[in-house]
Image (cartoon, rainbow, N blue to C red):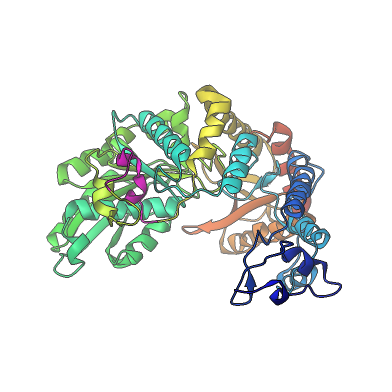
Amino acid sequence: MSSDSDRECPLDGDPHQQEMVPSKKSAVLVDGVVLNGPTTDAKAGEKFVEEACRLIMEEVVLKATDVSEKVCEWRPPEQLKQLLDLDMRNTGEPHHRLLELCRDVIHYSVKTNHPRFFNQLYAGLDYYSLVARFMTEALNPSVYTYEVSPVFLLVEEAVLKKMIEFIGWKEGDGIFNPGGSVSNMYAMNLARYKYCPDIKEKGLSGLPRLILFTSAECHYSMKKAASFLGIGTENVCFVETDGRGKMVPEELEKQIWQARKEGAAPFLVCATSGTTVLGAFDPLDEIADICERHGLWLHVDASWGGSALMSRKHRKLLRGIHRADSVAWNPHKMLMAGIQCCALLVKDKSDLLKKCYSAKASYLFQQDKFYDVSYDTGDKSIQCSRRPDAFKFWMTWKALGTLGLEERVNRALALSRYLVEEIKKREGFKLLLEPEYANICFWYIPPSLREMEEGPEFWEKLNVVAPTIKERMMKKGSLMLGYQPHRGKVNFFRQVVISPQVSREDMDFLLDEIDLLGRDM
């Protein structure tokens, strides 16, 4: 404790230091730190937030639909390090410099809300989700107990209930979590817990060799989950797919019988509704029949394709999904709820999620609280701190209604159909296969290869076309489009249509630009 004479004096000429020292006459010091009053300049902070928001509005939101803007201002890593002032220093920097940094960050970042960003399974700007994100970032909640997140827990409950309806279950459970990969891991662990509940306390010792089955076209998160959970990647059986990328049910049943013959213990089948590359949908009814015969948990990774459930026209792609035990569905993809917004939905209503993941922390989930503690849903999660991701989707759903979300899906798939027909008409473009969803996979064949026989030399030369065009489009900033080789097929483009900002003109531009950038190869 100290008297006025013990107060620390501000450093001469240092306005930041002057702001930090309280002006009260009787300052209290502990360990040399002044404890009187706040140490932040609220007025200056508010002004910075206001100016930064104006910058975001001008440079991101208002330019989101402007096709004359670049998708990205490409720079190689070492050059970008020099252009961005990345060093953190001992003293803080003035607000005008921070705003310059904000402007640089926006300038050199990829504009995923640009109408010509087609690189990933997400794209576009949903204004309602954006406002919801602004709100949750400002409020900074964590969704584990009702006492700290009353509104957001009720919102999550309402959204999960509605999503469960669209799957076709009469009741169920669920939780939002960071990514479809985590949803798949949740489901794998939940299926294992259902198969052998003792594992939660006793661990892996004494268990039989557990084995799971998934499509050869599944998301790579299945291998990661098996590794993380101690199941082992060698115990993930990849079931062969047909020419369209769909799991072959007869091959699944053969592998299950073979695993049992070898003394392994099958416990899970993961089907995929909307594969990452080809956009294929596994035959869920046939797979569910097999799971019922063998007593296996059926998980459907509908992270990408689940949003087709919103469309009366296209929900048939997921026929049989109501027979699944769990479903992963990412509204941040086709429905544009903003990354990240991912739900794991579970048919079980016996609190299986909570039984599997609960740790009963007495400092957080006290049972003698003054309200209904069943709303403290955080013990169902492997996380402690958890973002209110459902709120973004809820705000969009409230704004557009179910019919508006349905139209978003229908329009994306109609644009995909338009692009497919245009590819068929144009010389030098060749589809890999007829798509059933929003993934359009195609080769661009430059004039120099169009008369060449499709032998080893042709495919070797075609393999470098997509990567070269990708480099050119990135450096030009005109569009972003993904490419990859796939199961023996050389590099091809994968075009994905999502955003309602995308138009027919953008589809035409895409093909024109690829031809422009590749015709000299």
Residue lying at the far right of the rendered structure: 13
The residue at 69%/76% (across/down) is 6
Quadrant holding the N terminus: bottom right
Q: Is residue 330 left or right of residue 440?
A: left
Residue 78 position by quadrant = bottom right
> Where does the magenta region start and end?
367-383
Q: How many marks?
A: 0
Question: In this view of the protein, can residue 90 be seen by the observer?
Answer: no
Tell me which corner region of the image, top left, top right, bottom left or bottom right, holds residue 376: top left
Residue at 25% x, 53% y is 356
Q: Is residue 375 magenta?
A: yes
User: Which quadrant, please, contains the C terminus?
Assistant: bottom right
Residue situated in front as seen by the camera: 111 or 355:
355
Which residue is at a point 56% across and 63% down the rendered structure image? 456
Position of residue 418 relative to residue 355, above or below, is above
Direction from residue 300 to residue 251 in the image, left or right: left
Whether residue 432 appears in this view of the structure is: yes
* Location of residue 478 in the rendering, given as x and y in whole percent from the top left corner: 77, 49
Measured as percent of width and height from the top left, residue 29 is found at 62, 72
Give the x, y percent position of residue 375: 34, 40
Is 228 situated above or below 376?
A: below
Q: Magenta stretch: residue 297 in it? A: no
In the image, taking residue 381 as reference, residue 482 lies left or right, namely right
Q: Nearer the viewer, residue 450 or 364?
A: 364
